[in-house]
Amino acid sequence: MKKPIIIALHVGYWFLYLLLLILFFLFLEAGGIKNISNEHERLLVFLRIMGAITILPGLISFYTFYNILFKRYLSARKITALCIGGLITAIFAGFCGMIGLSVFTFGKISINNGAKEMIVILFFMSILALIHGVIALVMKGFITWYGDIQFKELLNKKNFETELALVKSQLNPHFLFNTINNIDVLIEKDATKASEYLNKLSDIMRFMLYETKVEKIPLDKELMYIGKYIDLQKIRTSNTNFVHYTVNGQTGNWSIAPMLFIPFIENAFKHSTNKKQGNVINIAITATQLNLIFSCQNNISEINNVMDEAGGLGNSLIAKRLNLLYPDKHELELKSQAGLHSVRLVIRA
């Protein structure tokens, strides 16, 4: 929810509350405080007393519930702690109201004047403060709920844009044509191996068309797709050792957004040079209980710039997708220097 709307909700709430107090004053005017002859003095006395009894405790309780208790306890579903914290806040706000009452009335009403009366006033102010606190929780909950809806809509929109970009990037005609041609050449040399690669290509196409429709998939499925993609890339060169791919840790405990790593791997194959050498591309994925770490390094020419690929899925779009999928739960580092391009992505549990 936009900040001006949130401010308008707060202003509207306190405006209605003050309007209610004014109506209460008019009711008293009809037959309550006419012992004070001057109308101006009656209004001042009313404002001082109401300011201490209703407005001051209300403000303290409302914004304590709104800014502190909601985030610390209600969002974390610590209901018992919320109730205890709410009661303490309400009583504290009541005491502040008592002090304010003494100050605003210039000591004419104080804690020493009638203990029972003061206890009743304290109880009243605490209950009123508690009501303000509950209303604050409801308002904060509504704002948070509405913000979550907007976030999900934005996420769906960005995911749709990303999905389109992924389709354009992944269904690259050059990759498909080259792979099919390589398999066609391989049929004459080794029909069994050609059939194996054709099945891998079919699995990749199936994965891209059907498995990427969900929000998250098991990490093992993503790794299986990456492995088959790398295998198909290897048949395009006589040196199959130019790429080194390793997986470490307990991958079965992780689920991730589909096709999270493959854009970086695609760029590595597209921009790498000297594929006749060994270890031109190094890809490593490490899974722990707390972090999922992806790293990819590849050799590049000095004039080659892969920091933002306009023809495929650019790094800026990838970064936006990560910010939406893993806000405050990821770290992305991209470097291109000394003929080496590196990517390091950390996803936190």
Image (cartoon, helix red, strand yellow):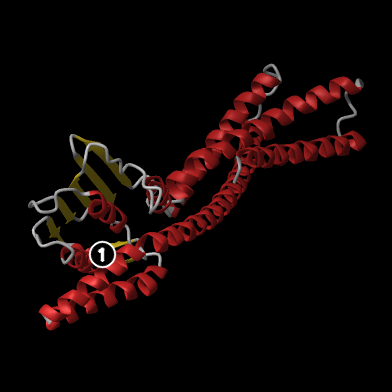
Residue lying at 90% horizontally and 23% vertically, measured from the top left: 39
Quadrant of residue 37 within the rendered picture: top right
Quadrant of residue 200 within the rendered picture: bottom left
Answer few, some or many: residues within 10 Å of disc 1's Cα (few below 14, many 20 plus, some between 14 and 19).
Answer: many
Q: Nearer the viewer, residue 161 or 69?
A: 161
Residue indicated by mark 1: 219
Residue 3, x across and y down, in percent: 61, 39
Residue 96, x across and y down, in percent: 58, 29
Residue lying at 18% horizontally and 64% vertically, measured from the top left: 236
- Residue lying at the far top in this picture: please name it: 106
Q: Nearer the viewer, residue 223 or 16?
A: 223
Work out whether residue 349 can be spotted.
no
Residue lying at 60% horizontally and 24% vertically, measured from the top left: 99
Q: Nearer the viewer, residue 106 or 118?
A: 106
Work out whether residue 263 can be spotted.
yes
Which secondary structure, mark 1?
Answer: helix
Quadrant of residue 56 within the rendered picture: top right
